[in-house]
Image (cartoon, rainbow, N blue to C red):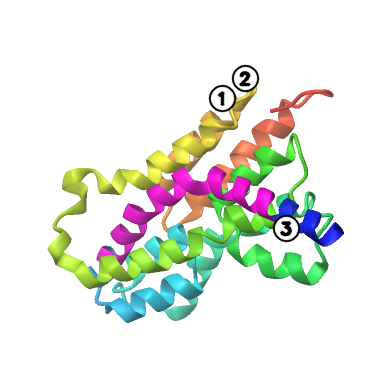
């Protein structure tokens, strides 16, 4: 009887995670196709694009890598830039690990590979009202991975046949998805302050600094604003 109840609970939590992530899965298709097309234009064949999406699994890092791919930069600079872009995953992992009390250390370590910006945002929102279970985590995080590498392969395979993706606004899908994710965190003016501080510093860094420092500096600015304006009992 316990096993049956546990199975029902797993199924229910997994379904809940799947339903929460489903709208983002729809957006993932065109975004990953866009990256696949971009990778093909830089010289990667469909199988190389598939392997990169399968193993790296970081949209922003992969787009930055493709920007640097043909610039004949030293390999250490390419690695450093990608590592800088990916530093946010350290912060997200630290944040979400607070809510993974029911996970074994091994299970948590393995599952964190599938932690994306979007999955992190949904799980943080859920954690505010109920616990995150392994089943919910898998329901939210796991489905995005095959969508990402599958559509990356498709985009790279079709390549130029897709035409200019910017002409139909496909390049805005990435930004639109993150705007929708951020909207779910709105809790009042202080949330707006965090977003404004983060975006203003990120834009300035993008304009005046080389590389991908705008991602890290924008995040630091948002956290700094939240810390400086925090009062006991506040909830950003």
Residue on which disc 3 sits = 134
Q: Is residue 99 left or right of residue 82?
A: right
Question: Compared with residue 227, is residue 213 higher up or lower down, i.e. above or below?
Answer: below
**Callout 3: SS:** helix
- Quarter of the image for the N terminus: give it: bottom right
Q: Is residue 231 magenta?
A: no
The residue under the point 60% across, 43% down is: 122
Question: Compared with residue 89, is residue 194 higher up or lower down, i.e. above or below?
Answer: above
Question: Which residues are drawn in magenta?
Answer: 11-37
Disc 1 and disc 2 in contact, CB within 8 angstroms:
yes
Q: Is residue 73 visible?
A: no
Q: Is residue 110 left or right of residue 184?
A: right
The residue under the point 74% across, 26% down is: 235
Q: Residue furthest top?
A: 189
Residue on which disc 1 sits = 192
Q: Looking at the picture, how far across and down is residue 225, in whole percent?
A: 65, 32
Q: Looking at the picture, how far across and down is residue 231, in whole percent?
A: 80, 23
Depth check: give the residue in front, 201 or 58: 58
Of marks 2 and 3, the one in the foreground: 3
Crowding at dot 3, Cα within 10 Å, few <14 / some 14-19 / many 20+, comes out as: many
**Callout 1: SS:** helix
Q: Looking at the picture, how far across and down is residue 185, in whole percent?
A: 60, 32
Badge 3 or badge 1: first in the primary sequence: 3
Q: Is residue 35 magenta?
A: yes
Depth check: give the residue in front, 29 or 156: 29
Residue on which disc 2 sits = 188
């Amino acid at each position: 009887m316990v096993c049956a109840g546990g199975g029902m609970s797993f199924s229910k939590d997994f379904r809940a995670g799947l339903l929460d992530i489903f709208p983002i899965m729809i957006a993932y298709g065109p975004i990953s196709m866009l990256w696949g097309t971009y990778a093909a234009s830089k010289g990667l064949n469909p199988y190389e694009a598939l392997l990169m999406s399968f193993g790296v699994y970081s949209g922003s890092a992969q787009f930055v890598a493709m920007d640097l791919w043909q610039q004949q930069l030293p390999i250490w600079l390419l690695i450093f830039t990608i590592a800088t872009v990916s530093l946010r995953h350290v912060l997200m992992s630290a944040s979400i690990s607070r809510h993974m009390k029911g996970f074994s250390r091994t299970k948590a370590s393995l599952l964190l590979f599938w932690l994306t910006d979007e999955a992190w945002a949904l799980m943080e929102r859920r954690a505010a009202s109920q616990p995150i279970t392994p089943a919910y985590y898998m329901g939210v995080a796991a489905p995005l991975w095959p969508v990402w590498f599958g559509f990356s392969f498709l985009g790279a395979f079709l390549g130029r046949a897709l035409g200019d993706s910017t002409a139909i606004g496909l390049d805005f899908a990435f930004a639109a998805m993150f705007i929708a994710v951020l909207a779910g965190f709105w809790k009042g003016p202080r949330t707006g302050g965090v977003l404004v501080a983060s975006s203003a510093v990120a834009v300035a860094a993008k304009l005046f600094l080389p590389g991908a420092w705008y991602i890290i500096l924008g995040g630091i600015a948002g956290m700094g604003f939240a810390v400086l304006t925090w009062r006991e009992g506040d909830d950003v």
